[in-house]
Image: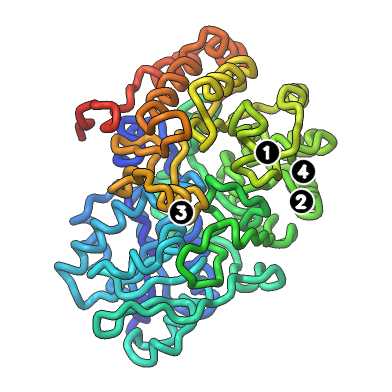
Amino acid sequence: MQPRKLDVLFVNPDSSFKAYQALSKDFSAIEPPTWALLLAQSCRAKGFGVGILDCGAERLGINDSIERIIGADPRLVCFVVYGQNPNSGTTNMAGAHDLCAQLKEQYPQYVTCFVGSHTSALPKEVLAWDCVDFVLLNEGVYALHNVLQTDLKEHIEQVKGIGYKKQGVLILNPPERVVPQDRMDVDLPGYAWDLLPYREKPLDLYRSHFWHAEFNHELRTPFVALYTGLGCKFKCDFCMVNIVNRVDNTDGVVASHSPTVRFWSPEFMIGEFEKLAELGVKTVRISDEMFFLNRKFFEPLLNLVVERGFKFRMWAYSRIDTVQPQHLDLFKRAGINWLALGIEAANLVIRQEVSKGSFKDMSIRKVVSEIGRHDMNIIANYIFGLPDDSLKTMQETLDLSLELNTETANMFPCQGLPGSALYYLAKSNGWALPDSYAGYAFLSYESQPLPTKYCTAAEVLRFRDDAWKKYFSNPAYLSLVERKFGANQRRNVEAMSKIKLRRKLLGDPPPGP
């Protein structure tokens, strides 16, 4: 009996150098392709033959990637394009387009499709590429099931949730629903961990964020990132994570139009954690956009983690106004040692302007102190260049970051990301947007943030880069790292801080390979 032909190969392209420059070699994370894993397991549960090609983890060039695709010989090549940062899906389109274009040029018989956050934001733009046969709208779960039930040629016009071409005309069929709450455990039944590549043991090609491992390279692998719930209830103008929930094909739809949140049951998720423990994984990212929000879901899950006695090193997202101090002890006992804390800006008015007033007037200092009192670490997230920012208010944000002196910090230049409200604000105001996918990457050479009412894009980018340097070379910060994590870890941070990002917008020459 001949083996069954592979129905779909999920491809995770590699855009790491374009996105992170020299940081990609040793310091940036290499995450498992979460949505490729979810889609693969979902299709496998429906009886389809599936595979995953993770070009990022294996650091495959285009020629090697094509060779592997041809070797797998799937009916459908599905490019699953998201990002390690929830807002960075557009960045990875660069590597995806290059690979898909060359595959189609050399082997035009292969049927290709795209799914992901950028595709959800601008499906017609992606479908217009000569190398793309289909796009899957929104998260694509049911659309993928639908299209795989066909021969990929006949009756495509009847398949909900996809876009396709007919005699050169771009057609978006009526959208499919996203997986509803009551079907999460059934139609998204976990992660296809066994399909990932590895060198010596499962998941050893993946590494955590540097800070997650307390700046110790030896603790970074094996590593996993997984969701316990999907979506976010907030409607921040700078964010596009909810765009994959859209069920409206109208042009100009933004992420804030579909703030849908869904969860797997705690009983189902504890099974995923048990699988990870059996695979020897200790370092885990909970990728939910707002894990520390709904007690109904996080409390029973974390209690189960505590009961099982797992010894994970985990981190999760929160916002200043969603931290619930009465639950910090449970978080700590479950192994969540880090909170990624969305502070965004020091000025409350600026925060509220882009958060549609949802940001409560919380005492940032009090919340940070309370987290520290529970012996938990903080990676504070700041954004420079929000629409009402000036050099003065950006300095206020930098001053606050230095005062709080958290265990680490992310500092983002504000981007008009496709799918966000700021993207369409920029287009309506005639503001310059990036002319390349890499231009949407926060750390890339081509990074092109938005201007503000008072600052040019170049001023925003320069301020952000200077602020990052000041933070990570600050003696008080380096002393904190040494005191909490050790002298070697301090030296690791110092080595990282010496890597200078090159910026086209600031007149720098391009980085070398």
Q: Secondary structure at mark 1?
A: strand
Residue hosting label 4? 306
Is tag 1's residue or tag 2's residue first in the polypeptide sequence? 2
Is tag 4's residue or tag 1's residue first in the polypeptide sequence? 4
Q: Secondary structure at mark 3?
A: helix
Q: Is residue 437 visible?
A: yes
Count of picture labels: 4
On residue 319, the disc is 1
User: Cα distance, mark 3 to mark 1?
Assistant: 25 Å
Does 4 sit above or below residue 97?
below
Residue hosting label 2? 294
Q: Secondary structure at mark 2?
A: loop
Task: Name the residue type under label 2.
Answer: Asn
Q: Are marks 1 and 2 in contact (CB under 8 Å)?
A: no
Find residue 188 and report its image quarter.
bottom right
Q: Are marks 3 and 4 in contact (CB under 8 Å)?
A: no
Is tag 3's residue or tag 4's residue first in the polypeptide sequence? 4
User: Cα distance, mark 3 to mark 2?
Assistant: 31 Å
Q: Is residue 201 left or right of residue 297?
A: left
Q: Is residue 169 left or right of residue 145?
A: left
Residue at the image point whose x is 35% and y is 49% from the top: 56
User: Cα distance, mark 4 to mark 1?
Assistant: 24 Å
Residue 397, horizontal then vertical, whole percent: 57, 23
Instruction: Tell which tag, 3 or 2, sits nearer the viewer.
Output: 3
On residue 424, the disc is 3
Q: In which quadrant will I find the C terminus?
A: top left
Task: Name the residue type under label 1.
Answer: Arg
Residue at the image point whose x is 45% and y is 89% from the top: 158
Residue 260, horizontal then vertical, whole percent: 65, 61
Does 275 sit above or below residue 72?
above
- 409 or 253: nearer the eye? 253
Residue 511, horizontal then vertical, whole percent: 23, 31
